[in-house]
Image (tube, grey):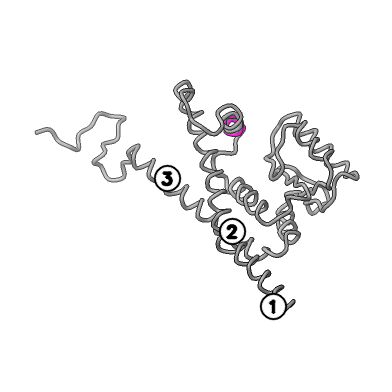
Amino acid sequence: MANPNHHHQGHQNPIQPGAVSLEDDTFKRVAETREQVNQVAASAREAIQAFYTDPQGLVELIERYETPVYVLRAGPFSNVILKILGFEPGFILPEATPRFTWLQRVLSVQDRFFSGRKGRHPNGTVSFSNGVFVIPDALLTMGFLSHQLHHWLSFRSGMDGYCERARRLYKKFWAENQGQIGREVFKMDAADIMALKAAINRDLEALKFLKAIADEVLIPARQARRIGHGTASA
């Protein structure tokens, strides 16, 4: 019988103590990702519980972490600016592209189309290196902020799914495939598949968090206010 501890030079023996198989490494990465997901959800829940009656307070919290927040005043023109540049309202990831440079320039004008505070460095300059929140006034609600806050915290935690490749694939996933995975996946390489999977997972986690926080905090708070108003007017 061959010696089970005998192996060719340059290859780890899976029986040897300390050897790590591909499966072990995969399980470790899955466990680490789950831990990150739980930490992000806990941080987001803590923030929402602290500011669920005060959206502006949540905005100020975000800005303290050097992420600027701009609130678009009511009216169609400010929303058209985002659409022309190809951005969606909410948390916008930083990117080294001409359109992101133009967005910074437009926001820095701080003209009559924008209101709200800016996240600043201690020296007073505005930094877009952590991304930027651009929110129409009508969407300055705890529901919308909860979903976007979760994405912001996931990005700051260094989770996968926010690189340029992942964003491009995810946008195509919705624009061309309406959120359905079809035969085109067989033409994708492994890196593209992993990037798309990570982007999908991050949005599912944010949506799951939104549903949970709505059930746990936002809906009960709304019901309590209605009961309070009813009692006060009785």
Instruction: Tell me where residue 27 appears, x and y as whole percent.
Output: 37, 44
SS at badge 3: helix
Residues rendered magenta in the picture: 164-169
Give the quarter of the figure containing the N terminus: top left
Give the quarter of the figure containing the C terminus: bottom right
- Which residue lies under the disc numbered 2? 214
Instruction: Check contact, mark 1 vs mark 2: CB within 8 A.
Output: no
Type of residue at label 2? Ala
SS at badge 2: helix
The answer to whether residue 168 is magenta is yes
Q: Is residue 3 left or right of residue 113?
A: left
Distance, label 3 to label 1, CA atoms, is 50 Å
Q: Is residue 104 left or right of residue 153?
A: right
Q: Which mark is residue 231?
A: 1
Type of residue at label 1? Thr
Mark 1 surroundings: few (<14), some (14-19) or many (≥20) residues within 10 A: few
Q: Residue at x 71, y 55 (%)?
A: 141
Instruction: Tell me where residue 181 appears, x and y as whole percent.
Output: 48, 30
Mark 2 surroundings: few (<14), some (14-19) or many (≥20) residues within 10 A: some
Q: Outermost residue, top direction?
A: 187
Q: Which mark is residue 30?
A: 3
Type of residue at label 3? Val
**Predominant secondary structure in magenta?**
helix
